């Protein structure tokens, strides 16, 4: 099997390592079946050949593509440029791609859709998602399932030539597909309650929620029944690996 390219955006070591281990565990992957690039520390090689990978997985992060240049740190701007730099080839050639949370912003922005903070912000926690269309990556998931979210921006409409796969009452574009193999989710398919507890502690001062709400949100996440979304990762690896 060719490895999967995993691009990570989180500058916090604990969050990045936990996310990577979740991708391995939930996707049924071994470390030697992946090529991990931490974009906060590494550049994408100039000679990167996407033909050498089974697919590309992009994790989440604190950046927002809808922020103005003045609002983005140099690191956030560099990470965004690196991700967007791969999207023309990925979308033109229909290369297997799964963008998680930040990844839907990157894909939708690249496809010309409006990504903004105007509507569909979701507080940190679990939301009820609903399938809107059949898709191989959703095989085995119930028609309605809980998933962890937490984001400041969202796609304001379905990008052109995309299929709408999953919605929630608070954010319509929870999962989309471009062509046949390019996917993105607003929810976190890799996240479980322990992983989200870690993120809540690390990001409590990042504007996602009031810092004094951290303990309440952790208790809410621990009580949530979130297990179905990981099947999406397993299906992605099984289909393209």
Image (spheres, rainbow, N blue to C red):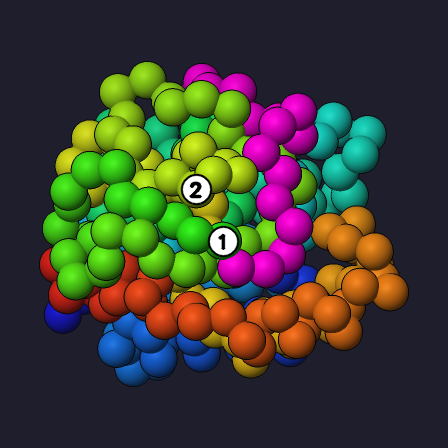
The magenta stretch is: 110-126
User: Do labels 1 and 2 touch, CB within 8 Å?
Assistant: yes
Residue at horizontal 76 percent and vertical 74 percent from the top: 215
160 and 139: which is toward the camera: 139
Q: Which mark is residue 127?
A: 1
Do we see residue 203 in this rendering? yes
143 and 99: which is toward the camera: 143
Tell me if residue 186 is in the magenta stretch: no
Residue at horizontal 66 percent and vertical 30 percent from the top: 117
88 and 207: which is toward the camera: 207
User: Which class describes the residues within 10 Å of circle 2: few (<14), some (14-19), or many (20+)?
Assistant: many
Q: Position of residue 74 (x, y in %)?
A: 75, 43
In the picture, residue 124 is in which quadrant? bottom right
Q: Is residue 64 above or below residue 150?
A: above
Q: Which mark is residue 168?
A: 2
Q: Which mark is residue 196?
A: none
Q: Is residue 82 above or below residue 16?
A: above
Upstream in the sequence, badge 1 or badge 2?
1
* Distance Cα–Cα, label 1 vs label 2: 7 Å
In the picture, residue 73 is in which quadrant? top right
Q: Position of residue 98 (x, y in %)?
A: 33, 50
Describe residue 164's horizontal placement relative to residue 194 as left or right: left
Q: Position of residue 113 (x, y in %)?
A: 46, 20
Disc 2 secondary structure class = strand
């Amino acid at each position: 099997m060719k490895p999967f390219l995993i691009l990570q955006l989180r500058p916090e070591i604990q969050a990045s390592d936990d996310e990577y281990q979740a991708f391995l565990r939930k996707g049924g992957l071994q470390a030697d079946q992946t090529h991990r690039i931490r974009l906060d520390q590494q550049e994408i090689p100039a000679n990167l050949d996407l033909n050498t990978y089974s697919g590309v997985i992009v994790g989440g992060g604190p950046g927002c593509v809808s922020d103005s240049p003045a609002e983005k740190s140099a690191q956030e701007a560099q990470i965004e440029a690196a991700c967007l730099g791969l999207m023309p080839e990925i979308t033109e050639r229909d290369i297997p791609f799964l963008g998680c949370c930040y990844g839907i912003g990157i894909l939708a922005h690249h496809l010309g859709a409006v990504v903004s903070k105007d509507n569909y912000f979701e507080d940190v926690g679990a939301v009820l998602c609903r399938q809107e269309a059949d898709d191989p990556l959703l095989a085995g998931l119930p028609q309605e399932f809980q998933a962890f979210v937490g984001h400041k921006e969202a796609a304001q409409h379905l990008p052109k030539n995309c299929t709408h796969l999953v919605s929630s009452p608070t954010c319509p574009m929870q999962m989309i597909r471009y062509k046949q193999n390019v996917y993105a989710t607003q929810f976190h398919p890799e996240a479980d309650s322990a992983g989200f507890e870690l993120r809540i502690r690390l990001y409590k001062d990042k504007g996602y929620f009031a810092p004094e709400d951290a303990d309440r949100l952790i208790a809410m996440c621990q009580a949530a029944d979130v297990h179905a979304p990981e099947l999406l990762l397993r299906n992605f690896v099984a289909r393209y690996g």
